Image (cartoon, helix red, strand yellow):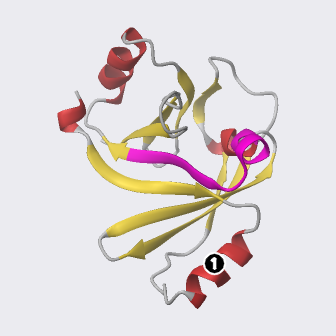
Amino acid sequence: MENNWKFHHMAVVVRDMDKAVEYCQSLGIVQFQPEFMLDSSTFIDYKVHGKTPNTIDKTRMRFIQIGSFQVELIQPVEGEPICKEFLKNEGEGTHHIAFIVDDLEGETAELVEKGIPVIAKAKIQNGVSFAYFDTRKVGNVIIELMQPAK
C-alpha cells in the first residue's frame, strides 16, 4: 500500500491567490506554473461525502516549484469545494499532501477498510483520477491520492 505511493505535492489553501503569489515572489520563489481553474462541471463521477454535489465547484490553482518540492496553491472561488470548508474552519494553511498511485481503486478500498473515509473523488476529463481521504485525526492534514491517465 503506502510503499507504492510517490510524493507529488503539498497543497496550501489561500484566501487570495494573487496576494499569495506576490508574497512567494517577494521571497525569491520564481518557478511558477501557469494558473488554472479546476471546474467540477468537467469532472466524471464527482462525489463529495458519497453524494453528487448540488453546486458547481471552482478552485483557482497554481503550482510552484521550490527546489525539488512542489507546492500547490488553492483558492476556492465558487460552490462548495472541500478547500472552502477548510478555509472557513481552519484558515489558510496546509490542506493536503498528494501522492501518485498506480491503483486508486485498490488503495481506496484498503483505506476505507481501515476506517479512513473518502471526502471527495472524481475523474478529470484528461483521465487523471483522484480521491481525498479524511486523515485529519493527526496533524489536521488530508491525504490525496492521484492516479495518472492510463
Q: Residue at x 37, y 9 (%)?
A: 113
- Magenta residues (range): 85-98
Q: Residue at x 53, y 32 (%)?
A: 136
Residue 38 percent location from the top left of the image: 63, 53
Check the image and report above or below for 18 versus 115.
Answer: below
Check the image and report above or below for 16 versus 119.
Answer: below
Picture quadrant of residue 75: bottom right
Residue type at the position of mark 1? Val
Position of the C terminus by quadrant? top left
Along the line of sight, the residue nearer the viewer: 46 or 21: 21
Q: Residue at x 41, y 74 (%)?
A: 65
Position of the N terminus by quadrant? top left
Check the image and report above or below for 33 versus 136.
Answer: below
Q: Which residue is mark 1?
A: 21
Along the line of sight, the residue nearer the viewer: 63 or 136: 136
Residue 33 falls left or right of residue 109 = right
